[in-house]
Amino acid sequence: MSVRVDSSTFSGEVVRRTVLDNGLTVLTRELHTSPIVTAMIWYRVGSRNEELGQTGKSHFLEHMLFKGTDRFKKGAIDLLTLKNGGNNNAFTSHDFTAYYFNFASDRWEIALDIEADRMVNCVFAPEEFEAEKKVVIEELRMGLDSPWGLLLQELDAAAYKVHPYRNPVIGWLHDVERATSVEQQEYYRRHYHPGNAVLVLAGDFETDRIVDKVSEKFSTIPKRPTAPDVSAIEPSQRGEKRLQVQWRSKVPRLGLAYHAPEIAHPDSYALQVLNLVLTEGKTSRLYQRLVEREQSVTFASAEYAESKDPTLFHIRAEARGDHTAEEIEASIHEELDRIVNEGATTQELDRSKHLVQAHFILSRERAVDQAMLLGQVEALYGLSYIETYLDKISSIAPEDVASVCSKYLTAANRTVGYLIPDGSANDDAEEGDYEDA
Amino acid sequence: MKTPEAEISRSFDVHSRTLDNGLQVLLVENPAIPAIAINATVLTGARYEPESKAGLAIMASNLLDEGTTTRSSFDIAAAIEATGGHLETDASFERVVAAATVLKQDVDLGLELVADLLINPIFPEDYVSKEKSRTLAEIASAKDRPQVVAGWALNELIYDTHPLHRPAQGYPETIERITRDDLVQFHGQFFAPNNAILSVVGDFKIDEILARIEKRFGEWNNRPVRLSAIPKPVRQKDRREKFIPMAAQQSNIYLGHLGIERTNPDFYPLQVLDTILGGGAGFTARIPQRLRDELGLAYTTFASITTTAGIDPGRFVAYIATAPENTKLATEGLLNEIRRIVDEPVSREELQDAKDFLTGSFVFAFESSAQIARFLIQARIYDLGFDYGQKYPALIKSTTAEDIARVAGRYLDTENYSLTVSGPMEKR
C-alpha cells in the first residue's frame, strides 16, 4: 500500500508520516487524552494560486465542497456530522485550504469516507453554485463591515506590487460576482488530488488500524500531476508607501506592514521572537509604551504568520481618546529603533522561549490543535520545521532580534495605512424614524 | 472498546471539599498533559451593580491584576509570563472569574497569583483612571460593529429595567462616574471565600493539591455576604422595534424575547429545539438551511434560547446579517421558521438527529482541563450534580415530539417580540 513510512518526533511525541502510492501524505498522531478524533485534510492551494480577475476561487471552492457529490448529496455532509454528534468546518488562507471533522473516537470512519469522496467527486450543479455565490458575497460584505477587515485588505493590496498575497483570500467583490461554475470546476480538478493533499489524523485511535482504513478509502483515487507552482516574486520595495482608507468610524486605527521572509527562512525565528517581545503579554514593549505609559491605544498587536512565500510583518493599533494615529505611529517607530540600538533583553528572550515551550505542551491537550499544527507545517514546508523549532528559538540571541529589526522593519520596507473617518458616523440613532432602504 | 461517554467519566470523578473559611473547592485529577487549570469564581457580577455605576463589575475584574498589596501590575504580568502560562480575569452578569493555566511545575505560582488577585487587589488610583479611559474607548470601538449595536439594542428592549438590559461594560456616563471607592467597596461587599468556588483540574494528586490550596486560600477571611434579590424580568406582551441607521454593507437583525433560567427543567427539550431550529452541526438546522442554503440570504444566521440561560432568564434570539435590500425578506424568514416549530410537530427523524447530535457531541465539552474546570463551577452554581455525565444523555434521549411542541408553544412567541435592525436606512 504505502511507499514510504517515516516517523518524526517533536516534544518527545511520535508522528508517523505515510505516503500512499498516489502521492497522498498521511500524518498520524495518537493522542489518548480524550475520546476524540480529528480528521483534517489540507490542500496546497489558496489565494496565492489565483489568476488576475479570478480572485476568491480557492475560498469559493471551499464552500462548494459542502454542496454535494453523487454519493453525499447536498446537505448530506452536515447531516452525517449531526447524526454522529460531530462538528466540521473549513478555512482558506493565502497558501492552503483545509477541512476538518471532530468526532467521538468510535465513529471517525465517516470522515474518511467523506474526504476521499469529495477530493474528486464534487458535482458543481450550476444552480447550487449561483445560490452559494450569494452566501459568499454576504461573507465578503461582513468582512467589510469590520474596521480591521477593511484596513488590512487595503494595506496588503498596497504593500505588494505583483505577488498574489496582495489579494484578499475571499477575493475582490467583482471577481466573486463574475465567477462561473465551469471555471470553478476546472480549478478544482487542477488542485484537488492526492499528491496535493495532506491528511492529518490526531486523537484516540490505533495508528496501524487507521492507516489501513485510510489506504482502503483513498488508494483507489488516481495519481495526478501537480499543477505548476505560482512563480511571481515580489520585487524589493523602494521606499515607504502610505495610504488612507475612509470609513464610517470616528476611531482612528493604523496598520503597518513590513516585507518579511517566509517560513523556515533563517531570519524567521528571530522575527517570531521580535513579535513576542513587541506585543505578547502585558510586559511587552508596545503594551508598556502605548497602553500603560502613553495610554494612547485600546490595544496594539503584531502578526507574523508562517507562509510559503515572503510575507508581511504586521503591527496594528487602535487609538483611544484624543490620541492620533500619527502620534501612535511615532511611538511605534521609536520602540523599533530602541530594539535596533539595544537589542532584546535576556529576560525577554527567556520569556519568549518559555511561551513557545508552554504553547507546545498545551497544544497536546486537544486533537484539533495537534492536527492544525502538524497539517499547517507539512503543507507549507515539512515536519522537520517543528522538529528543530524549539532549538532554533532557543538559540536566538539579543543581537539577532536587533539585527532582523534593522534589516526588515525599516522605513523603506514599510507600508503604513490609516483608517480615517468618512464623515458619516453619527453619535446616536434616532428611534423609529427610519425604514429599510 | 469503551464508549466515549465512559471515557469522559473522569471529568465527573470530583473531589469536593469546603475549607474552614467557607471556600468551596472542586478538584479533578487529569494527567493528560503536564499542566493544571485553575478557575476561581466569585458569585457576583454586573447583575448586582447599581444602575448608576453600570460597568463596575467588569471594571473591577479588569483591575484585579493591576496591583495587589504584594505585587505591582508589572510584577504580576512578569511572574506569569516568565512561565509561559496564562492568567486572566473576566466578569459577566453573574460571575467574576480569575483563572490560570500553568505547567505542572508552576502550580504554586498559579495558585498564589489567583489567590493574590482575589484577596489583595488594591485598585490603584492611576490604573482606575486608565481603565476608565480604556473602557470608554472600547465602547466607542464596539459601536463601529453593526452586530454589537443591534445586540445591545435588543437587550434594552427585552429586559426593560432588569439589570440585563445594560451592556455588561456599562455606558459612557456610568463609567465616568465610577471611583476607586466604588471598586474597593464592590470588592469588600462580595469577594469572600464563603461567596466563591475554586476548581482545579489537571496533573496532580488530590492530597498534595489540597495542601497547596489550603496554604494559599486558607488565610482568606470570611464575612457575611448579602446577595440582594433581584426582581424577575417579565416577558413582554407587546411588540417592540428599534431601527438604527449605520453606513454598513449589511443589515444586522436580531429578533427575540425573554428566555429561560438555566435551572428550568425544560432546558433539555429546549436544547433539542435549538438544535432543530437554529443550531446543530453545519447548516442542518431549519433557519440556516432555509435562509442560508436555500435562499442565499446570509453567511451567518442562527437561533437559540438555551445558550444565554443563566441565573437570570436568558434571551430567545434569532439573528441574521443580510444585504440591506433583503431585510424584510430575512426577518419574515426567521419568523416563518419560528412559527413553523410552534405550529407543527417536528418530524421523527429531525428529533432523533438532534438527540444524537447532542448526546454524541457531549464529549467535546470536556476536552481540556480548563473546560472541565469551568464545568465544575457551572455544575455547582446551577446544581447540575456531578452525576451529570449519566443524567445528561438520559434527559436528552427522553425528549419527545410532544415535549418539543409543548416547550415551543410555551417559550416562543411570534407576536410579542422585540426586533432590532442596524444598517443602511432611508429617512421617511
Image (cartoon, rainbow, N blue to C red):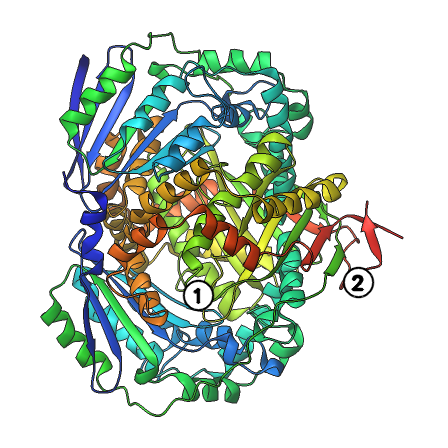
Which residue carries the number 1 mark?
B264
Q: Is residue B225 left or right of residue B220?
A: right
Q: Is residue A41 left or right of residue B245?
A: left
C-beta proximity under 8 Å, tags 1 and 2: no
Location of residue B228 in the rendering, given as x and y in whole percent from the top left corner? 48, 86
Residue type, label 2: Glu
Residue type, label 1: Asn
Res A6 seen here:
yes
Q: Which mark is residue B351?
A: none
Q: Residues within 10 Å of mark 2 (few under 14, many from 20)?
A: few
Does dot 1 land on a helix, a strand or a loop?
loop
Nearest to the observer: residue A230 or residue A372: A372
Snapshot quadrant of residue A207: top left
Nearest to the observer: residue A170 or residue B366: B366
Image point (59%, 24%), residue name: A55
Q: State how far apart marks 1 and 2 are (Cα).
A: 35 Å
Location of residue A57 in the rendering, given as x and y in whole percent from the top left corner? 56, 22
A118 above or below B148? above
Nearest to the observer: residue A163 or residue B411: B411
Image point (52%, 59%), residue name: A299
Considering the image in quadrants, where does the C terminus of chain A appear?
top right
Q: Chain of mark 2?
A: A
